[in-house]
C-alpha cells in the first residue's frame, strides 16, 4: 500500500522544494513549519480525496488549515477534565465545546467533498476515475455493502 502512493509523495515533496526555491529566489521569509504542515495536509487529503485541502492562495484552503491546526492545538492542550473526570460534564475550560465546533466544521467540509463526488458519479459528469480512498468507499457502497454516509464521514475524520 505504501509503494502505491510513492509517486504522490514524491510529487508533494517536489512541490515543497519548488515552493522553497521560489521563496529563496524572491528573498522572502520562509516559515518552514507552515510549509511542512501544508505539504503533509495535502499529502493526506490527496490520498483521501484526490485534492489538496490547502494551498497558499485560496481563502477557503486557509480556513481548512486553520480548522485542522486548531484541532491539533486543542487536542494537545492539557484539559483539567481529563485529570478529574468528575469535571467532564461541566467542561470548565470549554475544550469539549471548541473541539465539537471544529469537528462540525470538518464534517461540513468532508461532507461537501463526498456529496460532490457522489453526485458527479451519479450524473456521470465526471468521467475521471479517482484511485483514492473516497472512490474505494463509494465502490464498496455500490457493491451492496451497507456503509452509511455518516460512517463514511467518520472514517475520513479519523484519518485526517
Image (cartoon, grey):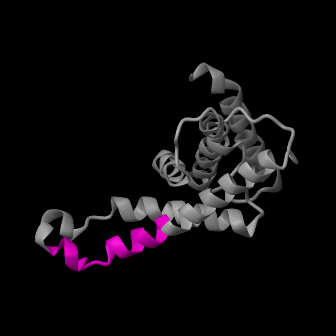
- Asked if 104 appears above or below 28 in the picture, the reply is below
Residue 128 x, y percent position in the rendering: 84, 37
**Residue 36: image x %, image y %?**
59, 47
Q: Which residue is situated farthest in the front direction here?
A: 144
The residue under the point 26% across, 64% down is: 78
- At a point 75% along the width and 36% down the height, the residue shown is 130
Answer with the quarter of the image where residue 97 lies. bottom left
Q: Position of residue 110 (x, y in %)?
A: 61, 57
Quadrant for the N terminus, please: top right
Instruction: Quadrant for residue 44, please give it.
Output: top right
Residue situated in front as seen by the camera: 110 or 17:
110
Depth check, front residue: 105 or 135 = 135
Where is residue 132? Give x, y as percent.
67, 36
Point out the stretch of residues depicted in magenta: 87-103
Q: Is residue 121 left or right of residue 150?
A: right
Whether residue 53 is visible? no
Amino acid at each position: 500500500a505504501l509503494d502505491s502512493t510513492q509517486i504522490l509523495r514524491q510529487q508533494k515533496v517536489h512541490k515543497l522544494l519548488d515552493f522553497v526555491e521560489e521563496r529563496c529566489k524572491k528573498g522572502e521569509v520562509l516559515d518552514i513549519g507552515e510549509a511542512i504542515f501544508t505539504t503533509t495536509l495535502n499529502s493526506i487529503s490527496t490520498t483521501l480525496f484526490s485534492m489538496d485541502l490547502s494551498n497558499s492562495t485560496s481563502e477557503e484552503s486557509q480556513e481548512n488549515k486553520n480548522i485542522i491546526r486548531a484541532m491539533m492545538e486543542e487536542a494537545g492542550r492539557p484539559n483539567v477534565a481529563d485529570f478529574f473526570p468528575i469535571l467532564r460534564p461541566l467542561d470548565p475550560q470549554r475544550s469539549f465545546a471548541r473541539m465539537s465546533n471544529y469537528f462540525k466544521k470538518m464534517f461540513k467540509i468532508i461532507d461537501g467533498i463526498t456529496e460532490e463526488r457522489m453526485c458527479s458519479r451519479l450524473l456521470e459528469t465526471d468521467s475521471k476515475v479517482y484511485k483514492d480512498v473516497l472512490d474505494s468507499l463509494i465502490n464498496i457502497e455500490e457493491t451492496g455493502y451497507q456503509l452509511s454516509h455518516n460512517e463514511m464521514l467518520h472514517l475520513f475524520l479519523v484519518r485526517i
